[in-house]
Image (cartoon, helix red, strand yellow):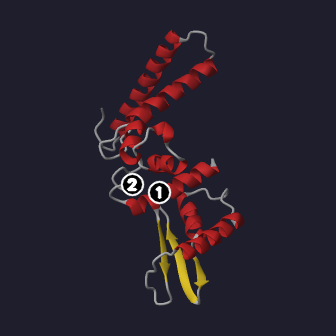
C-alpha cells in the first residue's frame, strides 16, 4: 500500500495505517467476544496482528506467508517445521534475497572451514567430523551466551566456537566457522 521511499511522510502514513488497523481489529474482536477484559482484548489484538503478519509476509521465491514458505523450502507445513527450519524461515524477512536458502545457502547456514598446514581445504571424514563435534560441544559447555546482546557479539561467539586447531592422525588442521543468518536467529531464540 505504501511506496518504498524513506521519508517522514511515509512514516506518518505508516502510523496512521497502524492505528486504523489496530482499531479495526479491536472492534472486530469486541463484536465477536464482548466479554473480554481490556488486557485480554489487547492480547487478542496482538495475536491477530501477528497472525496476519505471518500469513502475508514475503519470504522469497514467490512465498507470501509462513505456510507457503514452509512448503516451498522444506516441503512440509509450518506446523511440521523443526527448530532449524523455523530459524531459517525466521531469518529470511530481514533480507529475502540475501537470505534465500536456494541461492545463498552460505549466508543462511554458515560454513565450516577446515584447512591443513598448507592452508589447503580438507575433505571432512566421519572421524574428523566426530572430533570437531566433540570439540565444539566442549566449547559450548564452557561458553556463556547470555551476555551477547548484539548481532556482532553473537557472530563473534559463534566464530569462537569453531576456531581452533586439531590434530588428527599426525596432521594438524585449522577449523573455523563463518556464521550464517540462522545462527543469529537460533542464538536470539536461546537468549529469549
In the image, what residue occupies the spot 37% across and 38% down?
68
Give left or right: position of 190 versus 126.
right
Location of residue 148 in the rendering, given as x and y in whole percent from the top left corner: 62, 59
Image height of 116 relative to 90, above or below: below
- Spatial distance from mark 1 to mark 2, Cα to Cα? 7 Å
Image quadrant assignment for residue 174:
bottom right
In the image, what residue occupies the spot 61% across and 74% down?
131
Q: Nearer the viewer, residue 147 or 57?
A: 57
Image height of 16 relative to 181, above or below: above
Question: Are the two marked residues, 1 and 2, in contact with CB atoms closer than 8 angstroms?
Answer: yes
The residue wearing badge 1 is: 181
Kindly identify which numbered label has been placed on residue 99: 2
Give left or right: position of 72 versus 176.
left
Kindly identify which numbered label has been placed on residue 123: none
Tell me which numbered mark, 1 or 2, is placed earlier along the sequence: 2
Q: Residue furthest front?
A: 126
Amino acid at each position: 500500500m505504501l511506496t518504498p521511499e524513506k521519508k517522514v511522510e511515509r512514516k506518518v502514513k505508516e502510523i496512521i495505517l497502524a492505528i486504523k488497523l489496530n482499531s479495526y481489529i479491536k472492534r472486530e474482536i469486541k463484536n465477536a467476544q464482548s466479554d473480554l477484559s481490556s488486557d485480554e482484548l489487547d492480547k487478542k489484538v496482538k495475536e491477530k496482528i501477528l497472525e496476519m503478519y505471518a500469513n502475508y509476509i514475503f519470504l522469497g521465491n514467490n512465498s507470501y506467508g509462513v505456510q507457503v514458505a514452509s512448503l516451498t523450502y522444506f516441503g512440509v507445513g509450518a506446523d511440521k517445521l523443526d527448530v532449524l527450519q523455523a530459524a531459517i524461515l525466521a531469518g529470511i524477512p530481514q533480507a529475502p534475497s540475501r537470505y534465500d536458502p536456494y541461492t545463498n545457502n552460505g549466508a543462511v547456514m554458515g560454513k565450516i572451514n577446515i584447512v591443513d598446514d598448507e592452508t589447503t581445504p580438507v575433505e571432512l571424514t566421519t572421524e574428523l567430523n566426530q572430533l570437531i563435534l566433540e570439540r565444539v560441544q566442549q566449547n559450548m559447555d564452557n561458553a556463556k551466551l547470555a551476555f551477547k546482546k548484539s548481532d556482532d557479539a553473537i557472530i563473534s561467539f559463534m566464530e569462537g566456537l569453531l576456531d581452533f586447531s586439531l590434530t588428527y592422525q599426525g596432521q594438524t588442521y585449522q577449523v573455523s566457522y563463518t556464521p550464517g543468518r540462522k545462527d543469529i536467529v537460533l542464538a536470539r531464540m536461546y537468549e529469549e
